[in-house]
Image: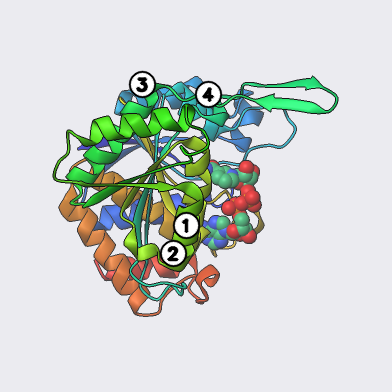
Amino acid sequence: MRTITLINGDGIGPEISKSVMDIISASGLEIDWDIQTAGADVIEKEGIPLPERVLESVRRNKIALKAPVTTPIGKGFRSVNVQLRKELDLYANLRPCKNLPNVKTRFENVDIVVVRENTEDLYAGIERRIDDNTAESIKIITRNASERICKFAFDYAAKNGRKEVCCVTKANIMKLSDGLFLETYRNIAQNYPQIKQREILVDNLCMQLVQNPTQFDVLVLPNLYGDIVSDLCAGLIGGLGVAQGANIGTDCAVFEPVHGSAPDIKGLNKANPTALLLSAIEMINFIGEKSYAEKIEKALYKTLEAGICTADLGGSASTTDFTKAIIERL
Ligand code: NAI
């Protein structure tokens, strides 16, 4: 049996974690969950939101499923999410965005995977105030980081039967930094002749995404464009309740929904577990248990097709009703 870390989060985290554990268990896939608490509630007992035991557990098990964690505002703690990414060097942010049955959106048949570089670019945090009226932020792009993210995108495409990897930059203006990212992409692409190459400027990409998103397959982007475009793509498929994600490094991978801890609906049995479930399905695929991933995905789709969904998607099912309905369809 495989041991996987479960960071069950706070707010709606524990409710949706229970739902997903129940569904996976009912599918027949046996996972020994190493449950680790983190976040606001842990600060009171342990003094910090991300104790070392959590990091040790992920390092040991290599794979984690993570529910959302509240970031306390103004208490001087770094966000658990940012810290996890830094400590475990989770350099690739993966956001598959695929339409779900009965979830109303502007477009049908969207199936885009956004691969965002997670460690550098303008997010390196190198900023200074030069004088009262001027500030600067430095954009760092390195060959090493660009190489590993482009390689990740092509490997993902190859493994998952994807046809194209499109490189997104603004290399016409930032000729050196984005130029290096693009140059690296072109070099890496040569090793994957079976996968189509495409290059696009980020402004054009945004226009195309809101006009005709089905033309895109896998996108690979530097950090800042990736951050913005991945949210745009999440919006294309129905937003927070259904947007899954993963942060992947060389040694460890953490799978997590895009949404936060939704304190406004905590404990009300209203939370939609779909985004965490989709993240878990991606995780199950990642560990090589494809047949279980397909089985759970099918049951989720059948449930949505039957018109059963939570309030955020316009339905009336509670978290537990929705979970039960999926389990019945497994
Ligand atoms: P949020 O995503 O928690 O909530 C925004 C709105 O969407 C709320 O009305 C909420 O009820 C609704 N919502 C979110 N997820 C839902 C779900 N699964 N089912 C039904 N409705 C859902 O964003 P907000 O309020 O800005 O952040 C709350 C806390 O979460 C903050 O402390 C923030 O720092 C943290 N956060 C944590 C993240 C993580 O752990 N990865 C990501 C984003 C925010």
Given this view, does label 1 or label 3 mark the residue nearer the observer?
A: 3
Residue 300: x and y in percent read 32, 66
Q: At 37% across and 28% down in the image, what residue appears?
A: 146
Q: Which residue is mark 3?
A: 144
Question: Dot 2: what SS?
Answer: loop
Residue 28 in sight here: no
Task: Locate the C terminus and report the quarter of the image it occupies.
Answer: bottom left
- What whole-number distance in Å separates the C-alpha atoms at marks 1 and 4? 31 Å
Q: Earlier in the sequence, mark 4 or mark 2?
A: 4
Identity of the residue drawn at 19% across and 38% down = 1
Mark 2 to mark 3 CA distance (whole Å): 32 Å
Give whichever of discs 1 and 3 has the lower sequence position: 3
Disc 2 to disc 1, C-alpha distance: 6 Å
Q: Is residue 192 in sight in this rendering?
A: yes
Disc 2 vs disc 3: which is toward the camera? 3
User: CB of mark 2 within 8 Å of CB of mark 3?
Assistant: no
Frontmost of labels 3 and 4 is: 3
Residue picked out by circle 1: 234
**Residue 268 located left or right of residue 313:** right
Residue closer to the observer: 172 or 292 = 172
- Residue 51 is labelled as 4
Residue 311 % position (x, y) = 54, 71
